[in-house]
Image (tube, grey):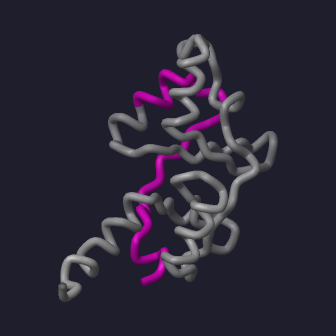
Amino acid sequence: MLVRDAMSTVVLTIGPDHTLRQAAALMSARRVGAAVVLDPDAGGIGILTERDVLNAIGLGQDPNSERAHAHTTTDVVFAAPTWTLEEAANAMTHGGFRHLIVLDRGEPAGIVSVRDIIRCWAPQRLHVPA
C-alpha cells in the first residue's frame, strides 16, 4: 500500500503568526494532530504538531502570545505519494516523529500519520491465520 492510499488529503494550513491557542483550537476542531505552517516570507513549509503545543505549555509559555513560527519544525522530512507505507513508517521511526507532510510536485498534497498507517495495516493483520 502507498502513502497516497493512506494520507489525509484535507490538510490544515496555518500561518506563522497564528498563536498556539489558535493553532490548537483549529487542530482540535478538525481532529488532527498537526498543521502545515506556510511561511511565504521564509519561503518554506513547516509543521506544528500537538507535541509542539504541549511542550510550549509545559514550559510555561503563554499560548495566547506564542506564535506558531517559534515552535514550527522547519527541517521537515517530506514523503512522496508513491512511497510505501513501510518507507513512511521507517522515516517516522528514524526521525522520532508521527506525521509526514506529503509533497506532490513541490506542493503539500496531504499528511500521513502513524494513525493512518495503523488504520491501513490493522485490517490486514486481523485476517492473518493463527
**Figure quadrant of the N terminus:** bottom left
**Figure quadrant of the C terminus:** bottom left
* Location of residue 64 in the rendering, given as x and y in whole percent from the top left corner: 54, 13
Residue 87 in which image quadrant: bottom right
Instruction: Say left or right for 126 vs 11.
Output: left
Up-down relation of residue 77 to residue 87 (above or below): above
* Location of residue 101 in the rendering, given as x and y in whole percent from the top left corner: 58, 59
Nearest the viewer among 88 and 112 is: 88
Nearest the viewer among 43 and 60 is: 60
Instruction: Say left or right for 33 vs 125.
Output: right
Q: Which residues are magenta?
A: 1-25
Residue 68 in which image quadrant: top right
Nearest the viewer among 122 and 4 is: 122
Q: Residue at x 65, y 27 (%)?
A: 17
Instruction: Say left or right for 44 vs 122.
Output: right
Q: Residue at x 33, y 73 (%)?
A: 120
Q: Residue at x 20, y 77 (%)?
A: 126
The magenta stretch spans residue 28? no
* Location of residue 47 in the rendering, given as x and y in whole percent from the top left corner: 61, 46
The magenta stretch spans residue 3? yes
Nearest the viewer among 32 and 116 is: 116
- Furthest toward the bottom, the residue is 129
Up-down relation of residue 81 to residue 45 (above or below): below
Q: Residue at x 58, y 40 (%)?
A: 48
